[in-house]
Image (cartoon, rainbow, N blue to C red):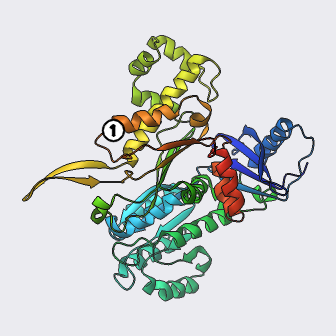
Amino acid sequence: MHVNLVVAEIGSTTTVVNAFSVKKEVAYLGQGVAQTTVNKDVNIGLREAIKDLKAKINRQKLKYNAMYATSSAAGGLKMTVSGLVYDMTVKAAREAALNAGANIHLVTAGPLLDGDYARIEEIKPNIILVSGGTDYGDKTVALENLIGIAQMNFNTPIIYAGNIENHERIKNFMSNHNQKDYVTLVENVYPRLDFMNIQPLRRKIYEIFEKHIIHAPGMQHIKDMVEGAIMPTPGSVMEAAMLMHESLGNLLVIDVGGATTDIHSITDVNEEFQEHYDGEPKEKRTVEGDLGVFVNYQNVVHQMGKNVLATKLNLTVPELDEILENYNYKPQSDIERRLVYELTRHCVFTALDRHIGDYRTVYTSSGRKIVPEGRDLTQVQSVILTGGALIYLENTENIIQEYFKSKKKKMVPTHEVVIYKDSDYIMSSMGVLSLDYEDIARKLMETSLRINEV
């Protein structure tokens, strides 16, 4: 059987392989799943997922033109971010890194201190991002930070996205110290006040991630099987969200996973509050590393409180403990499904609370005013649910509707929204596929969302 294109999602827990036919008509063929083998060689789990795929589509052989991949295994894309002013260059660099799918382990503003260098060495990031200064503004801090990092010989890729006036000096320094291969220069992520230039930096992060992913544990031979692009999984979801924004308008994507809960929003702001959002990016991703329904389920249970969770499930605490002892991310019984539903609900509510802004009451000389603080989602028209829990459990749309109705002080959509499920569970595959096959990825995504049915 010739399937044309295959996309693998190599997660921290499972490896998923999706197959697509794109010759006569664009179609999703099926999905294989296996346990990720990041502690050995991820290709072992990848081959097992392909074997599972062949069994599900009843084929002994599987031929394809190209395989693409996304990965959040081995800690995903670990980054540190350094800038000049926290609410300016640091914020811009952080937003770009998050939108590209990074897990940010350290953020600093101003000159780096000895303790900051020690933290970077301890974190062992995949990429170090240095920003600072508008174009032709301050150039000292960003330059000194970059030179300081380079002199530490971390042997880690460095991206400089600060004041472009430093480019020649950086090139000269790196050339003289035989480190030019470790530093990449891109356009300033914050070239002028109240303007974030995120796209060039995001693309460069993808490129460097793909080039250096083979250095992550268990990933050394990934290019033996994957010929196409490799992207961070959350970055691929953001790319897919941007693709669907063209069809669905202002949208919100909620992705509850085993280890994290990611929220992506692509939206305009309310014209009434426009003055408060000058320079804010249209696209935003937040990642909650403490919210997951498998790797982090114990943390979610602790946040909820066992007494509260047991009451919701009509259980005693000892009965709940017995169920949790045998907890599996694939619920089998009705009570296990109810348990995962409640954990998922908590992840969604908490992650949305952290992502969405609030209405604040302030008192001025002209009287009482309502002002926005944080992310404005009042103009969102569509919500996409992805991640195993939100897709496979029943009635998860109710979680979103309940949240919007109960949060009167949050900047939630002000009108009815349409809720879509990523029914084929392919959203994380469509972002990386769209880099080369944009129209095909859009058609496949629209089919997965059952847009015509909704």
Can residue 40 be spotted in the picture? Answer: no
- Viewer-closest of 375 and 22: 22
Relative image position of residue 187 (x, y in whole percent): 50, 78
- In the image, residue 239 sits, relative to residue 179, either above or below, namely above
Q: Kindly identify the residue that appears in the image at 70 percent across and 51 percent down.
A: 444
User: As drawn, is 426 to the left or to the right of 133?
Assistant: right
435 is higher (above) or lower (below) than 191: above
Residue positioned 8% across, 58% down in the render: 366
Residue drawn at the location 44% of the way across and 62% of the way down: 282
> In the image, residue 132 lies at what x, y percent?
39, 74
**Residue 44 place in picture, x, y as percent:** 79, 44
Q: Does residue 417 appear left or right of residue 88 in this picture?
A: right
Q: Residue at x 59, y 74 (%)?
A: 182
Q: Which residue is mark 1?
A: 407
| Residue 67 visible, this orientation | yes
Q: Residues within 10 Å of mark 1 (few under 14, many from 20)?
A: few
**Tag 1: amino acid:** Lys
Q: Secondary structure at mark 1?
A: loop
How many numbered callouts?
A: 1
Q: Is residue 451 left or right of residue 444?
A: left
Image quarter of the C terminus: top right
> Viewer-proximal residue, 280 or 108?
280
Q: Position of residue 231 (x, y in %)?
A: 64, 59
Q: Vertically, is 221 above or below 452?
A: below
User: In the drawing, does residue 373 fall left or right of residue 173?
Assistant: left
Residue 332 lies in what quarter of the image?
top right
